[in-house]
Amino acid sequence: MKRNESVLITGASSGIGFVTANYLCQLGYQVFAGIRTSSNEVKFEDGIVPVTLDVTDEKSVTTAFRIIRNTTSAGLGAVVCNAGLPQAGPMEHLNLQRFNDLLDVNVLGNIRIIQASIPLLRSQSGTIIFIGSISGRISLPFQGAYSASKFALEAITDALRVELRPWNIPVTIIEPGNVKTKIRTRALSNIEADLTALTPQHRLLYEPIYRFALNHASRKSAEPIAVAKLVERILRSNKIKPRYLLGKDAILLHLISRLPTAWRDRIISSKLPEYGN
């Protein structure tokens, strides 16, 4: 697509979405930045159009797209579906309300955005880019809930990629490993809260793995600008691939995911601390 065309980015108030919105704006794209908070609380580059957009709220989505249609008569050149929530912890102690909220954002929220976007993408043969995760290709222990939402996003991507071929609308998904964002900070807070809420009996069973998860989530991560640059490369590409890995950790986990199940389980288990005693 041309750099003067319009791009909608969801989840743009911080992290990957915020950095990508500013980066694309600097390169000349017209950027609509979907945010849940007041635009006064987010300092974007001049030229970005902040749009209040809660992907879990049908009315909010409808209102946001009315604003976009009224602002750009040419339709959309791309949609970057970035809004998402984290969740970690053993399935035995999964907070089901939090899991329901996770699915509402990570799965249903993306579907709401796509359903509203497609009419604006048809005229431009615009591009759909999902910000997924390597967790959508391999489900690691204690990340089952998050992986479930990202596996669903992979399925949605595969279905849409074929469904939208008659209109030449490319659909792809970026699969990063760890990225340094507020989502990671939020995940750490949730892990701490869940650990505190455990009964003494279950703390004996699971505390080592919670501590491991906290240390694991704190390790070195990619910067959001790496994702932003990949998004722009995809937008400028004449041949868009179905999916893009990002980060050495993502590449390694992708390779592990292709091993026989017994090998994969043995490798993953060997990296975990002893727990359950």
Image: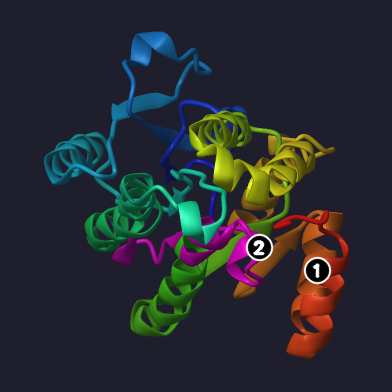
Question: Which residue is label 1 attached to?
Answer: 268
- The amino acid on which the numbered mark 2 sits, given as a three-letter code, is Pro
Q: Quadrant of the C terminus?
A: bottom right
Q: Is residue 164 left or right of residue 59?
A: right
> Which residue is painted at 58% across and 67% down in the image?
136
Residue at point 49% right, 15% down? Answer: 46
Q: Which residue lies furthest to the left in this view?
A: 59
Residue 238 vertical placement versus 97 (above, below) = below
- Disc 2 target residue: 141
What residue is drawn where x is 30% and y is 49%?
A: 74
Q: Residues within 10 Å of mark 1 (few under 14, many from 20)?
A: few
User: Vertically, is 269 above or below 222?
Assistant: below
Task: State how far apart marks 1 and 2 are (Cα).
Answer: 8 Å
At mark 2, the secondary structure is: loop
**Residue 35, percent from left and from top:** 37, 29
The numbered dot on residue 195 is none
Q: Give residue 214's position: percent from left, percent from top.
A: 71, 37
State how many labels appear: 2
Query: x, y percentage for residue 242?
Result: 60, 75
Instruction: For the residues labelled 1 and 2, say whether their Cβ atoms are less than 8 Å apart.
Output: yes
Q: Give the range drawn in magenta.
A: 120-148
**Observer able to see residue 28:** no
